[in-house]
Image: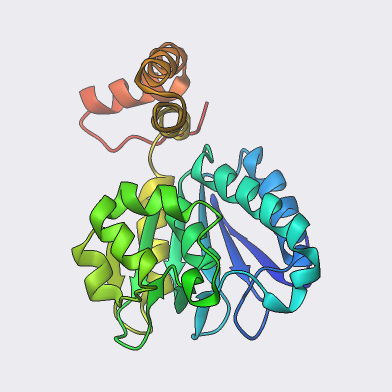
Amino acid sequence: MKFENIILEKKDHLSIITFDHPPANAWNLATLEEFEKVIDALENDRDTRVVILTGAGEKCFSAGLDVSDTANIPKISPKARALWRRIDRFPKPVIAAINGYALGGGLELAMCCHFRIMVDDSKITVGLTELNLGIFPGWGGTQRLPLLVGKARALGMILFSKKINAAAALEIGLINQVSAPGKLMDDALEFAQKLVERPPIAVSCVLNAMAAGNYEGLDKGLNVEAEGSTRVRETKDRVEGFTAFLEKRKPVFTGK
C-alpha cells in the first residue's frame, strides 16, 4: 500500500504510520484521504495488534491544518474530526511517537492516541495555537485537553496559545514518556512490543469499554465491559493465560 503523503510499514504485529507531507506534515484533504484508507485497512487487519503514528523528519510530528488548502476546509475539518475520533476509539492501542512540533490539529491527533511518547528536546514544543490565527481548536482539542490536564490548565494553554516542551508536557500528564534525542523510535518500538505481547482480544475489550464510558456514559461503559468479559471467557487466549500461570511460564497469546 503506497501513498504520496503517508508511509505504512509493518513489522510482525506492529504497523507504523508516518506522515510525510513536507515541510510540516500538515493535513490537507489529500493527506486525510490517504490516512483514512490506511486506518480502514488496519482496523480489521488481524495481524496488526499495535499502531504507531509519527512524523517524517525531525522537525514536525504535525503542524495541524495545511493552510495552503484552505479552499477545502469545508471538507477537511469534518473528515479530520471523524478520523481523530476513530483513533480515539480505535480497537487497537495507538502510540503517538512525537518526533517534533505537534501544534493545533497535530496535537489534537496525538491526544487521541492511547499513549504519547515525545522526544526530549527543549526546542520542540506542543500546543493548541489556533487562537493566534483568530480561530480555535475544532478537531477535538477543547474536549480532550481538559480530560488529560484539567480544565484550568487546558483553558490557559488554549486561550494563550501556550506551547510547552516535553518535560512540561510530562509533568502535567499530557504525554506518558520522554525519549532522548535519537532514541524516540527505539523507545516507541520497545513500548509497542510489550503491548503486542498482551492478549489482543482482551486489549480490544479494554479499549472498547473505556471508549464507551467516555463517549456514552458510565452505564454504557459498564455494559460494554460486561460484554467484553463474556467474550474473553470463550477465547483460546484465556485458556493459554491460565495454563501459563499454572505452568509458571510466560503466556503466548494468539488473538484467538
Measuring from the top left, give residue 224's x and y in whole percent. 44, 18
Quadrant of the frame with the N terminus: bottom right
Snapshot quadrant of residue 158: bottom left
Image coordinates of residue 253 in percent, x first then y, are 43, 34
Task: Judge from the rendering whether residue 152 lies leftward or rightward of residue 16; answer left or right.
Answer: left
Res 2 seen here: no
- Residue 13: percent from the left, percent from the top? 54, 49
Give left or right: position of 82 versus 70. left
Looking at the picture, does residue 182 appear above or below residue 48? Answer: below
Q: Is residue 149 above or below residue 182?
A: above
Which residue is nearer to you in this view: 158 or 88? Answer: 158
Q: Quadrant of residue 19?
A: bottom right
Q: Is residue 85 above or below residue 52?
A: above
Residue 205 or residue 253, whichever sits in front: 205
- What's the residue at 48%, 77% (across, down)? 132
Which residue corresponds to the image point at 50% horizontal and 85% vertical from the top-left? 59
What residue is rendered at 35% in x and 72% in y?
Answer: 160
* Number of on-image labels: 0
Q: Nearer the viewer, residue 214 or 225?
A: 214
- Residue 223 makes an appearance in the image: yes
Residue at the front extreme? 134
From the viewer's perspective, is 59 left or right of 43?
A: left
